């Protein structure tokens, strides 16, 4: 049934999928940098949803060590997220155009040479 749902949404969103794929091929560097930026910003939403679950896990954990470890890792993840978020939001060390220059402008699969035949 999951395959049918996937096929349905593939057909339903076909136009947007093709436009996104074309943008990926034609402007590879802009698309990849934009995707990484949006993934990083959406990580805050993941943390927002993950915190209640991890608090529940640490409360009902069978060992005190597991509880401390879960909370410690969540605090570290949250601190690193906010530090990097504010660092890159208010004091960008590298501008977006420079990062886009690190990637090729157009995505293409290299041709595989055929083996020599006699």
Image (cartoon, rainbow, N blue to C red):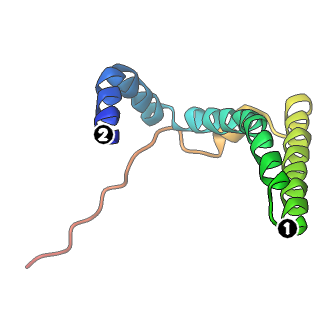
Quadrant, the N terminus = top left
Q: Locate residue 107: give its quadrant.
A: top left
Q: Locate residue 13: give its quadrant.
A: top left
In the displayed orientation, state which residue is furthest to the bottom.
118
Tag shown at residue 1: 2
Residue 102 percent coordinates (x, y): 65, 46
Tag shown at residue 63: 1
In front of the other: 1 or 37: 1
Where disc 2 sits, the SS reads loop
Looking at the image, do the residues carrying marks 2 and 1 touch, with CB atoms under 8 Å apart?
no
The vertical placement of 69 against 13, above or below, is below
Near mark 2 (Cα within 10 A), the count class, few <14, some 14-19 or many ≥20, is few
Q: Locate residue 110: give its quadrant.
A: bottom left
| Left or right of 117 on screen, residue 3 | right
Residue 56 percent coordinates (x, y): 79, 47
The residue depicted at 20 percent of the width and 73 percent of the height is 115
| Left or right of 64 on screen, residue 50 | left
- Mark 2 or 1, nearer chain start: 2
Q: CA distance from mark 2 to mark 1?
A: 39 Å
The residue depicted at 90 percent of the width and 65 percent of the height is 64
């Amino acid at each position: 049934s999951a395959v049918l749902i996937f096929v349905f949404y593939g057909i339903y969103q076909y136009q947007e999928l093709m436009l996104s794929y074309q943008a990926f091929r034609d402007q590879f560097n802009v698309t990849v940098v934009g995707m990484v930026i949006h993934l990083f910003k959406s990580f805050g939403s993941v943390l927002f949803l993950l915190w209640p679950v991890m608090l529940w896990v640490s409360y009902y954990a069978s060992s005190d060590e597991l509880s401390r470890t879960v909370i410690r890792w969540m605090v570290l993840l949250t601190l690193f997220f906010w530090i990097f978020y504010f660092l890159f939001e208010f004091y960008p060390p590298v501008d977006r155009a420079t990062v886009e220059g690190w990637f090729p402008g157009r995505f293409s699969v290299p041709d595989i040479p055929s083996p020599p035949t006699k």
